[in-house]
Image (tube, coloured by chain):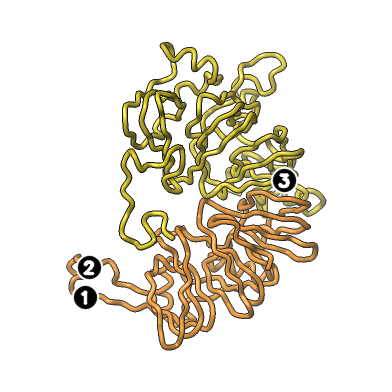
Amino acid sequence: MSAYGPPGGAGPVVYDPMTLPVDDNVNKYTFCVELKSGQWFLQKGKMIAYYGAIEFNGIGHGRLDRLVRTSFHSPLHAIDWVVADGSGKMLLADRAFDVNSYDLDNGNLTIRSGNLLAFQPSLTLKQSIVPGFLTLIGTGKFVAASNGPVVFMEPPIRVDPQALVGWADCPSPCHHYDHGYMTGVMGGLRAMTGLGGASGEEHQFEFVGAGTVLLQSTETLMAEQATGAVPSEPGVPGGGVPGGHGQPPGAPRLPGQLGDLQRRFGL
Amino acid sequence: MALREINSKMVEATVVPGQRLFSQRGAMLAYKGDVSFTPNIQGGQGGIMSMLGRRVAGEATPLMTVEGSGTVFFGHGGHHVQVITLSGDTLYVEADRLLAFEGTLQQGTMFMGSQGGVMGMVRGQVTGQGLFTTTLKGHGSVAVMAHGGVFEIPITPQRPVHVDPQAYVAHHGDVRNKLSTALGWRDMVGRGSGEAFQLELSGSGAVYVQASEEKL
């Protein structure tokens, strides 16, 4: 069976406004949204084509104020999102990544900000406490992209930070550090000299509790939006500019790691 | 079989105590259970001499040892993954294409010149394999990465297979390969078809080809 044509191989399928699927995938990489004088939020640049009369308005001051007030709670993201308003059908895609829609029924799901393409205004978008992730709450449909098909897993599981797409219903993850091979005499020697390198798997996100974890089958990330940088307030963990405490940006240094020296030697 | 394809870009590996697994460093996506990842200085199996051999041959990919009990998921760089199960024969593959392989397989390094002398070395240059390539021998499964989907073409003594050197991924079995050239005057004046070099594989076995001419 081919995704691009009828089984007879008579050539590509030609769609028109009538035959385009309604709120469903056209193929693995393209999703079609139908608007009936309604609205959808979508990330800038993810619309590849549309039929009908659809207006795309940036999120800001204006007549969309009410909508934004009720379902868009991420001032950091406002410049990356637009509201599609009108009637017609629009196609969403992103760099040939696999695109899928997900239905939330009075639930919550947290997703990497770069992977979320669009969502219905019946859902509410909020910034997750975990930097770089957004949480959707409520009932409705949203569209997300992933490099390779999404794989669903049940906790308890430990996930490479780059392979994580998102999670639903389970508590927020915690960090798990794994550097047992750096302990002991040989391990200490390895850590001191930097010889032997690192396994690259010292740090994972650990999920416990009940829920579902969404994984993508690659470690190549989509462009990350600097999200979750919360204002510097007392009681807000990680408030202020990330890495503003003299620590270099990126992963916190592991005990025994040489840091700059190790990086300079490319180990 | 310890390795299993979940989808086109992800493999699942079952780790049981006492059985080691080697994988490319940083290629773990997720794991369940109690599993440890140790960077492998030697870049695989064998002793110090094997390690030196790989270093000299440029086939020393950063590998890590995966031990413990649980389930591990591997994937890397959005590349397509193909699991190849070996039952006693030898797989020839470039070391940086190895995503994961079972510890039951014996890892070795082969000099391209040993298959066809100077032409073997030329072949290595054209396919991007260099002068050396990695061999895996024994019983077990290997996860090999490729750019684009992978398909397997069987090689029988009557039917040699011609492969674009850039699309070649790996081969196993009792296979002789040689570089066949189809150079003509057109290539000399710069109007060639772009298919002047082909890899001809003959014997009995199978060759794995990727649906892309891009290297990893």
- Among numbered discs 1 and 2, the one appearing first in the sequence: 1
> Residue B93 location, x and y as percent?
53, 69
The secondary structure type at the circle numbered 1 is loop
B100 shown above or below A87: below
In the image, taking residue A35 as reference, residue A246 lies left or right, namely: right
Which chain hosts label 2? B
Q: How far is disc 1 from disc 2 in space, using C-alphas?
A: 8 Å
User: In the rendered structure, the residue with mark 3 lies on which chain?
Assistant: A
Q: Which chain is yellow?
A: A
Q: Quadrant of the N terminus of chain B?
A: bottom right
Question: Given the image, on which type of amino acid does mark 2 rest?
Answer: Gly
Labels 1 and 2 within one chain: yes
- Residue A148 point in image, percent of width and height: 52, 49
Mark 3 vs mark 1: in front: 3
Provide the residue designation for mark 1.
B184
Q: Residues within 10 Å of mark 3 (few under 14, many from 20)?
A: many
Q: Which mark is residue B192?
A: 2
Task: Please provide percent x and percent y for residue A210.
Answer: 74, 39
Q: Position of residue A15 (x, y in %)?
A: 33, 45
Image-based side of A48 in relation to A164, left or right: left
Label 2 residue SS: loop
Q: Please report the residue visible at 42 percent of the width from the left and 54 percent of the height from the top.
A: A3
Letter of the chain in orange: B
Query: Horizontal placement of A195 versus A180: left or right?
Result: left
Q: Residue at x 55, y 49 (%)?
A: A218
Q: CA distance from mark 3 to mark 1?
A: 58 Å
Give the amino acid type for the residue marked by disc 1 in the picture: Gly
Side of B94 where A176 appears, left or right: right
- Callout 1: residue from which chain? B
Foreground residue among A263 and A95: A95
Task: Determine contact: label 3, label 1, CB under 8 Å.
Answer: no
Residues A228 and B128: in front is A228
